[in-house]
Image: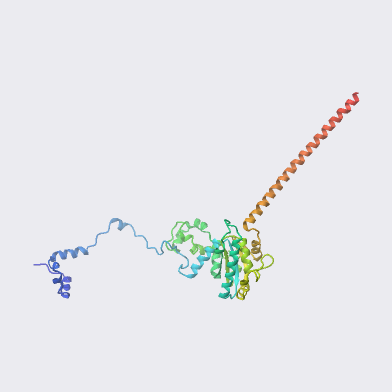
Amino acid sequence: MPPRIPLGLRQSAAVCPGAAARTPAAATIPAAALIHARHASAVTPAASHEQMTVSPPPIARYPTTQPPSHKPPEFRKSQLHRQYTSLLRSTPLMLLFQHNNVKASEWTGIRRELAAALRKADATIPEGSADADLASGIKFQIVQTGIFASALQVAEYFHPEQQQQSATSSSTTSAANIPNATPDPTDPAYTHALSRHAWEATQNNKLSHALTPLMSGPLAVLTFPNVSPVHLKAALEILWPSKPNFPAPTRRVNPGYHEPAVHSGLQKLLLLGARVEGKVFDEAGAKWVGTIGGGLDGLRNQLVYMLQGFGAGLTNTLESASKSLYFTIEGRRTMLEDEEKGGEKKDGEESA
C-alpha cells in the first residue's frame, strides 16, 4: 500500500492548486522522505549532564551599570539628591543665601554682575596659581531645600569605608532587602548615595548638622571649586556689600550694578552662612575668610613667617640662658684669678 500524503501537504495543494505546476521539483520528492523530515524536525536533542546539574544564573533585576537604590533612580528627586550630594562632597567653599520672590529678570542681572566681578578677580591672580581661572567654575544656583538637607546628611554622616566593615556580617539581611545584593563590601549597593545603607546612616535623630537650622525656606547656594579669598571678596562685594572691607562698586565704575532690576533682586537676598572645608561659618566668619590678604598663599606666608619668628625666639631664649651661665662662670673665674694675684703681691711685700 503506498504511503499517504500528509494532511498539511494536501491542504496546501487544495489552497494553491497551481503550486505543483509552479514547482515541479517538489512533486518528485517521495512521500516517505517528507514524513521522515517532518518527524526529524520535531525531535528535540536531549540536555547534557552539565545543563541538568548546574542551575541557571538568576535574572538580574538591574543592569550592571545601575546599582540598586533605596529610592527609584528614575525620579527627578533622586537625581537631584545625587547631584547635591556630589556637589557637597566636591565643593570646599559654599555660601548659602535665602531668596524671597526673586524674578527671572533679577536673577539674570545678578548673575551677570557676579560673573563680571569674578572675571576681574581672575585678572588679579598670577598665572600658574591654584586660584587662577576660577570664574568659570563658580556657580550661583537655586536648590530644593528638603532634598538639599537630605543630601547634606548623607554627605556628612555616610562614610562608605565604614559601611564596608559591617557589610560582610550583614550580607544575609541585606540580600533580603536589596535585590542582587552580594557579600562583597565593594559592591556599589553599599557605597552609592542612594543605597539603603546611606538612608539608614541618616535616620539617627541625634545626628544634627550645624546647617540644619538654616534648611528652611527658599535657598540658593554659591559654590566655589577652590577656597579663594580673592573670589569670595569679589562675590561678597556684589551679593552682600558692607563697608569698609566689602564696598559695593560705584555707579561710575560699574553702572550696570545700579540698575533697578539688579538692586531689587539683591535686596531680596539674605546671607545665612558658609561652609568652608567642611566647617560651618556664620556671616562674620565668611567675611573673615574674604579678608585674608593674598589669599591662601598669603595665609601660608604668614604662617611660615610666624613659625620662623617662633623658632628664632626659642633659639634666642635657649642661647640667653647658656650665655648668662657662661658670663657668670667667666666672671667668677676672673674674680678668683684677681684674688690669687692680690695674695701673691701681699706675700712678696711681706717677705721684702
Extreme residue toward the front, this view: 252
Extreme residue toward the left, this view: 1
Residue 62 placed where, x, y %?
Answer: 41, 64
Is residue 188 shown above or below 114? Answer: above
Q: Quadrant of the N terminus?
A: bottom left
Is residue 251 shown above or below 58? Answer: below
Query: What residue is drawn where x is 28% and y is 57%?
Result: 48
Residue 285 placed where, x, y %?
Answer: 65, 63
Query: What residue is drawn where x is 73% and y is 43%?
Result: 319
Residue 307 placed where, x, y %?
Answer: 67, 50
Q: Is residue 351 left or right of residue 136?
A: right
In the foreground, 326 or 53:
326
Q: Is residue 252 left or right of residue 170?
A: right
Q: Which quadrant holds residue 291? A: bottom right
Q: Quadrant of the C terminus?
A: top right
In the foreground, 8 or 139:
139
